[in-house]
Image (tube, rainbow, N blue to C red):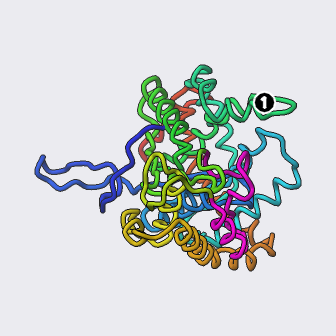
Amino acid sequence: MAALAAAPDSDQTGPAVLRGGTDAPAVPSRSVVIFSGIQPTGRKHLGNHIGGIRQYVAGQDKAAPAIYCIVDLHAVTVEYEPVKLRERVYDTTAILLAAGLDPERCILFRQGDVHEHAELSWLLSSVTSVGELNRMHQFRDKSAQQRRLVSAGLLFYPVLQAADVLAYRADEVPVGEDQREHLELMRDVAERFNGRFGETLVLPASRIPEVGARVLDLQDPARKMSTTGATEQGTVYVLDEPGTIAKKFRRAVTDSGSEIVRAEDKPGVTNLIEILAVVRGVSPEAVEHDFAGRGYGDLKTAVGDEVAGWLAPVRERYEALRGDDSQLEGILAEGAEKARAIAAGTLADVREAMGVGPARRSVGPAT
């Protein structure tokens, strides 16, 4: 999900409005809104967890509201099995809840249940150029992988993604580094809409982790960890058994030399240092200091053991949650109702600004 500076961490929770003169304190006009979407696949890997899910959980206590969407409409742009899609929505819901999302503190829903996303996507396509869409790296990469058909949906994926966020007038979008390009397009679309039809949409800011924004494949540190196109042994899944996780890290590809420091020519070691820093909640420099004078074997063992312990509670909670489809469906349905109430207002404003449908009736004074 475009290139914008992340909003600063502070007690200020929205755009400031000065009242009572220039020396008056800034008063937030509205609370921060956080939105992010996640693909429906139960095989979430360590990169998903560090770059996205961990941020979702933290966002629950800083936003009003924090809105998270399982993007089943995006999932149909490539080849898939319908039955598996529904199952994977439940898999993903259970993983998010196991990681710490609380339906009482956030809005969690399935994208396809809120029809406003699709209509807003169509309206926003009128201010999105085909040239911009053709240049998206994700479109070029995924279209090259298609065996039968390169769908128009794959090309328009970023427009729907823009609608997902803009429907909620979100201020921040927690994403990994790979979604920066889509966030840039999203901001361009919103800015173009506002310039043509009047200030209606909020330009969102990306929230990309300073450490761990791009977790790399353990067997091929030249590429990011991924559920597609990556190596099985180089991908650590959130639901992997502890022994499997430790084994994958012990076999991680490192680099020439022996010094445990971050460097451009040491992507494998740098990756391990940053992962351990996230797990420990410390700076990468602290990890480098801790392993000064030690070997790569010590580092790989430590990262494997600590990641396994870090993810174990998530895997255990997932197993307890995943068996009850009706409970998961109830959470998604309740979240969709809350999301629809917000998105409907934005869509009504967009339709009014664009002259689509009947004009709103003005409400006169009571008699």
Quadrant hosting residue 126: top right
Q: Which sits in the foreground, 4 or 194?
A: 4
SS at mark 1?
Answer: loop
Q: Quadrant of the N terminus?
A: top right
Q: Residues within 10 Å of mark 1 (few under 14, many from 20)?
A: some
Q: Residue at x 41, y 40 (%)?
A: 4
The picture places residue 117, in percent across and down from the top left corner, at 65, 42
Name which residue lies at 53% across and 61% down. Answer: 272
Would you say 350 lies left or right of 284 here? right
Membership of 251 in magenta stretch: yes
Residue 221 image position (x, y, % from top left):
59, 50
Asked if the magenta segment contains residue 248, the reply would be yes
**Which quadrant would residue 218 be assigned to in this image?**
bottom right
Q: Position of residue 102 (x, y in %)?
A: 58, 71
Characterize the magenta stretch by its predominant secondary structure. loop
Residue 175 seen in render: no
Q: Is residue 17 visible?
A: yes
Q: Which residue is mark 1?
A: 151
The amino acid at mark 1 is Ser
* Along the viewing direction, whichever of 365 and 170 lies nearer the viewer: 170
Placement of 356 over or under 157, stated as above or below: above
Q: Can you name the residue that lies furthest to the front here?
A: 257
Residue 98, x across and y down, in percent: 65, 73
Task: Give the residue drawn at x 62%, y 21%.
Answer: 130
- The residue sitting at 48% across, 66% down in the picture is 278
Which range is magenta? 223-252
